[in-house]
Amino acid sequence: MSETFALQETRCPKCSTTNVTANLYCKCCSNILEPRTDYWLQAQDFQTIADKDALGLVKSTGVLPHLLNQFLGKPRARKQLEIISREGRSLNRFGNVNVLMRECAYTLCLERLPAAHVITGAGPPNAFTFGDDDAPIIVIDGRLVE
Ligand SMILES: [Zn+2]
């Protein structure tokens, strides 16, 4: 005798798309489906005291954050996005690792699931993040995924 299990569905609180609850995050907007906390981790939660002091000093200058973002942050992000679009593969292709990432994001109380890409790197295997709280991106060397 075989049993069939109905997949429970949840409507995304942000965009109203119907999703499979077990996926934890919306397939359309990447927002969490069923919040497990009232507190969401932000990038600033990972800053050390020295990072916060340095950032506070930069912000106190007024214009320096804008200049750094324009001349360092945006060009660097643009270059990384070019590499991803040319060489990257979505983590969605890597079933078990993709599920693990969703579970980690949920455990870490991330309100939005980061976009995750796998690239073939040169040199030692590496992984890094960039973007911001509104569009977080994770890049993982394929050798680490394997
Ligand atoms: Zn959604």
Image: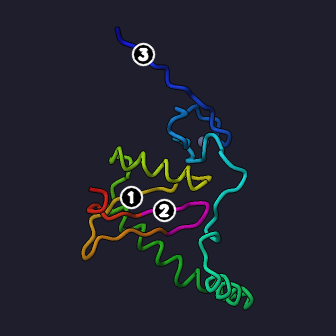
Contact, CB < 8 Å: mark 2 with mark 1? yes
Mark sitting on residue 4: 3
The amino acid marked with disc number 1 is: His
Q: Earlier in the sequence, mark 2 or mark 1?
A: 1
Within 10 Å of the Cα at label 3, are there few (<14), some (14-19), or many (20+) other Cα atoms? few
Is 120 on the left-hand or right-hand side of 13?
A: left
Which of the 4 quarters of the picture holds residue 123? bottom left
Q: Residue at point 48% right, 78% down?
A: 75
Q: Main secondary structure of the magenta part?
A: loop
Q: Residue at point 46% right, 19% down?
A: 5
Quadrant that contains the C terminus: bottom left
The amino acid marked with disc number 2 is: Ile
**Element at label 2:** strand
**Element at label 1:** strand
Q: Position of residue 46 (x, y in %)?
A: 59, 71
Mark sitting on residue 137: 2
Which stretch is magenta?
130-138
Q: Quadrant of ligand 1?
A: top right
Q: Earlier in the sequence, mark 1 or mark 3?
A: 3
